[in-house]
Image: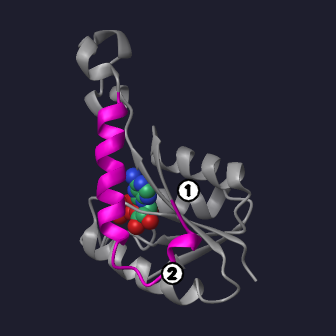
Amino acid sequence: MYKKILVPIDILEDELSQELIAHIEQIAKVGKPEIHFLTVIPNAELFFGIEFAAIPEKFKDSSERTRLAFVALQEMIKDAKIPDEQIVCNVGVGNAKDEILEYARHIDADLIAIASHRPNVSSYLLGSTASSIVRHAKMSVLVIR
Ligand code: ADP
């Protein structure tokens, strides 16, 4: 029985995320696991694709983007049929796969549940984030197709 399940959510992919959430609703019924929804936004360097020193001062702080991402994540899961007391929401800043793996270690997750890839990017059966997680995670990974 799972105790802590990490569910990485891409807030730009509403339809895909809703499919993932539908699976999680079922899993969440068994043994009342904590469900951690995590979305990762790029840090300023990744966002602008330039060195940190070259970024205008007012854009260096990512706290406002983090706040907006948190609101978007909550909006995305608001209709999920999962009891509130089982849900934890968080926003990571940086590279998606690194942040997801780090967060999973940090909470000692016993499962990561992830969608396989964006539906419109059909050439790969496993997206880049999903494949890195399957490869590098120490815990079990459930890939939703
Ligand atoms: P693709 O390469 O087709 O974009 P990905 O491997 O990036 O596919 O995405 C598969 C899944 O990885 C997503 O459905 C989501 O669960 C997770 N994921 C991708 N990007 C992020 C992100 N920025 N934050 C949280 N989870 C993400």
- Name the quadrant containing residue 78: bottom left
Secondary structure of the residue carrying numbered label 1:
helix
* Residue 52's disc number: none
Query: Which image quadrant shows ligand 1?
Result: bottom left
Residue at image location 61% in from the left, 64% down from the top: 134
Residue 36, x across and y down, in percent: 56, 63
Image side of residue 60 versus residue 107, left or right: left
Is-magenta flag for residue 15? Answer: no
Q: What is the distance, in whole Å, between disc 1 and disc 2 at their CAs?
A: 21 Å
Residue at image location 64% in from the left, 60% down from the top: 135
Is 42 in front, or is 3?
3
Tell me which label, 1 or 2, sits earlier in the chain: 2
Image side of residue 116 versus residue 136, left or right: left
Q: Which residues are magenta?
A: 62-88
Q: Which residue is mark 1?
A: 132
Residue at image location 67% in from the left, 58% down from the top: 137
Q: Which residue is mark 2?
A: 24
Residue 79, x across and y down, in percent: 33, 79
- Name the quadrant containing residue 139: bottom right
Q: Which residue type carries mark 2?
A: Ile
Where, quadrant-wise, is the C terminus in this rendering?
Answer: bottom left
- All told, the count of numbered labels is 2
Q: Is mark 1 within 8 Å of ligand 1?
A: yes
Circle 2 residues within 10 Å: few <14, some 14–19, many ≥20: many
Report whether residue 94 is seen. yes
Is 47 in front, or is 2?
2
Q: Which residue type carries mark 1?
A: Ser
